[in-house]
Image: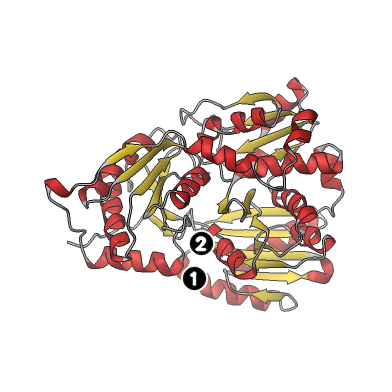
Amino acid sequence: MPLSLPEDLMVSVSGFRGRVGAPLTPELISTLAAAFGAFLGEEGAEGAVFLGRDSRTSGRMFADAARAGLVSVGRSVVDLGIVPTPTLLLAAREGGAAGALGVTASHNPAEWNALKFVGPDGLFLDAERMGRFQLSLRQRDPARVSWDRLGEVREDADAISRHLDRILGLPFLEIDRLRARAFHVAIDCVHGAGGRIIPRLLDALGCRVSGIGLETDGHFPRDPEPTAANLADLSGLVRRSGAEVGLAVDPDVDRLSLVDGAGVPLGEDLTLALCAATVLRRRPGPVVTNLSTSRVVEDVAAAFGVLCHRAPVGEIHVARRMEREGAVVGGEGNGGVILPDLQLTRDAPAAVALLLQHLLDVGTGLREAADLWPSYRIVKQKVSFPRERIADAYAALAKGFPDGESDSSDGLRLAWPDRREWLHVRPSGTEPVIRIIAEARDEAVAKKLIGRALDILA
């Protein structure tokens, strides 16, 4: 019979996400994987499904369940084991896969996990394709095959090495100069999949490395989201080791956050801007980011005489807009950088290399490099809010801020370009909350925008 999804399962273009045990169980994962394998066949996709996971303690259990579900509908599986999400997507696209499944809840705490769905193009399912998949879930149970038609399973232990080779071959990097410069870098991989790639990449770039959280055991010692507020341990490591820069990634290694040489967290809002400058210096072209990203990305684009386009929040929305605009670089303000020369997905290892190249280009430390651009203060808050009232909330906000330029493509974004301020309110795709984000040149002004929004929503 068709699958009935648990009510407390978070379902979006970011995948199917929930807490381990309730609602996320091996039985549910296996059924979802089987349904996805069958759906790929309905869509005409041929080949194996690539499977990868981050280091969460529930990861092996759910990966085993996903593998069984795929095999049960006749899909062969290429199992990559613990790998960064961008490694999985790159391997799937270049390996001619029918699609891919990522077992990862990205930046969520350890009690969460998720299943992320990837098409044969190596991109996450967009809204249209995800809609078709969800419709197939509601309409029919996937047909299981007989014993002599089961899919086969093989392991691929070289995906990370191939990913590294592709990064080191990017035309935006001066590898010999980077190796000669020999940056001293402190890293925090938060016991996620980053421990399998970031040290190897830095070694290949000639860096001296001081690291924490390199073990891939999934026992996150802190909130794994790499926001500035969560980087105290990395800040301490930078100061103790004398590193020139600190870099932190999330458990599935698609986001990069920054700490300067004095041990002060810059967070993730500057990552895309500085990496974009590296690319635009060598290849000017359009830039795409999402509606919640700092306008410093617009400043960088303007400095190189190119346009910056905005897309709804969500990697696939940015990637699709990048395709349409012919963008040379893009990403999201959460530290996710997308480089079409490599692939159209957020790739923290690529961002690490671009960031170090930027420091080499400008010949300064990270703080000085950041100070070359206008300084903004971005304030983020998330609050519980009934989804059924969200449309009324947008209407009230638009009425309460009548002078703002309005964009309703993803929640409601109100902007005041002459004042260099904006406010964005939208439901989260990964948590049962709404996000309220504001930016201004002055933190007090940004907080005031947040406060006014909260008063209107109360």
Question: Is 428 positioned to the left or the right of 348 in the image?
Answer: left
Q: What residue type is labelled 1?
A: Arg
Residue 49 rendering spot, x and y as whole percentages: 35, 49
Residue in front for this viewpoint, 395 or 343:
343
Q: In this view, does 211 lie above or below 304?
A: above
Residue visible at 66% across and 44% down?
351
Tell me the SS state at disc 2: loop
Residue visible at 86% across and 38% down?
364
Return the residue at label 2: 385
Quarter containing the C terminus: bottom right
Count residues near mark 2 (Cα–Cα under 10 Å), then give few for <14, some for 14-19, many for 20+: some
Q: What residue type is labelled 2?
A: Phe
Q: In this view, does 238 lie above or below 17?
A: above
Residue visible at 59% across and 77% down?
395
Label at residue 389: 1
Residue visible at 71% across and 40% down?
258
